[in-house]
Amino acid sequence: MRMLPRRYDFDSMFDTLLTPTENMKCDIYEKDGSYYIEADMPGIDKKDVKVDFDNGYLTISAETSTSNEEKDKDFIRQERFYGSMSRKFYVGDVNDEEISASFKDGVLKIQVPKETTVKSNKSIEIN
């Protein structure tokens, strides 16, 4: 009996090349005058997640590591991601005091208010 598919080694080589190192999948949507970012972070603890806002950029970062138990295993195939990951989003000139975040069941949900600056219309004279 053969445990590995015939093309396993060839397939895994391409999987490694094509698999992104950034495994944080996000949905972004607008609702009730705010933007929402929902990021999937399965297997990550809330204490390992960080959200920063700096000059209009919102950065989500997290880190996960293998347990000592998993380091002793002789993996045939390993598809779960371990290490650091981050995503950066430009959200504009918003009041950082109004940004809120919650984490439940491996999903980070961030609410960002829309830009707070007043936009004006102005004609620019061409010289």
Image: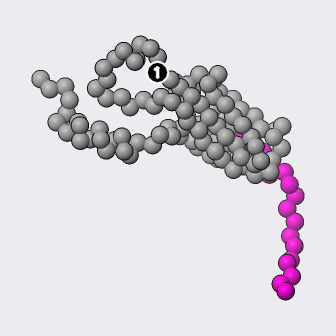
Query: For mark 1, what is the residue?
Result: 66
Q: In the picture, which quadrant includes the N terminus?
A: top left
Q: Is residue 22 magenta?
A: no
Check disc 1 and report its element: helix, strand or loop. Answer: loop
Whether residue 14 is visible, yes or no, is yes
* Stretch in magenta: 111-127
Image quadrant of residue 49? Answer: top right
Q: Is residue 96 above or below residue 82?
A: below
| Residue that appears at 50% across and 23% down | 65
Image quadrant of residue 38? Answer: top right
Please state which amino acid type lies under the numbered disc 1. Thr
Residue 17 pos. (x, y %) = 37, 45
Q: Is residue 61 above or below residue 17?
A: above
| Residue that appears at 20% across and 39% down | 7
Residue density around tag 1, few if under 14, some if 14–19, many if 20 or more, within 10 Å = few
Give the left or right position of residue 8, taking residue 25 as reference. Answer: left
